[in-house]
Image (cartoon, rainbow, N blue to C red):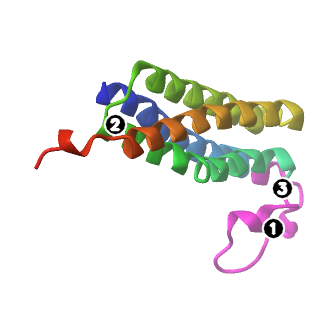
Amino acid sequence: MQAQILAPAAVLVVWSLVMLLWIIPARFGAVAKMPDKSALPNKVGVRGNDLEGVLPDKANWPAHNFTHLMEQPTLFYAAVTILAIMGPGAADVLAAWVYVGLRIVHSVWQATVNTIPVRFALFILSTLALIVLAVRAAIATLLADPSALPA
């Protein structure tokens, strides 16, 4: 069962890399379409945030989502790792897949349509799945039988 709980985490890692790669054509495509490139920051060490308000909002949406994938999912990775060590149940694996599926849908929505009500609903639903995983990880560790652990 340990491999089954780690599979959703591995998929979310791969998905995060997909979103990272999505940033490249979104931003470079927007820059290529700019008739007047003088609005681009002209400084050493330009960062993605420097393009806010310069490029169309939609060109920055994949980067916004990538940032989100570096935030809350860190809790997901911790919960999944704890459950993998402690021995996950089938419900834990299901909750992990629900979380990852909702995060992927959230990513696609944010990077393409980005209306807040739907995006927020997807975020709340994925957060509920994460809460389930976090509580299950806490229960698995707090109620662990120390006599069952190797010496």
Q: Name the residue under label 1.
A: 40
Few, some or many residues within 10 Å of mark 3 (<14, 14–19, 20+): many
Q: Residue at x 52, y 43 (%)?
A: 76
* Res 16 quadrant in image: top right
Relative to 107, is 96 on the left or the right?
left
- Read off the magenta span: 30-54
Few, some or many residues within 10 Å of mark 1 (<14, 14–19, 20+): some
N-terminal label among 3 and 1: 1
Q: Give the amino acid type for the residue marked by disc 2 in the picture.
A: Ala
Q: Residue at x 61, y 53 (%)?
A: 71
Few, some or many residues within 10 Å of mark 2 (<14, 14–19, 20+): many
Q: Is mark 2 on a helix, strand or loop?
A: helix
Instruction: Please tell me the numbered disc located at residue 90.
Output: none
- Residue contact at pointers 3 and 1, CB within 8 angstroms: no
Residue 12 rendering spot, x and y as whole percentages: 50, 36
Query: Hey, which residue is sitting farthest left in the picture?
Result: 151
Residue 38 rendering spot, x and y as whole percentages: 86, 69
Residue 128 rendering spot, x and y as whole percentages: 66, 33
Q: Is mark 1 on a helix, strand or loop?
A: loop
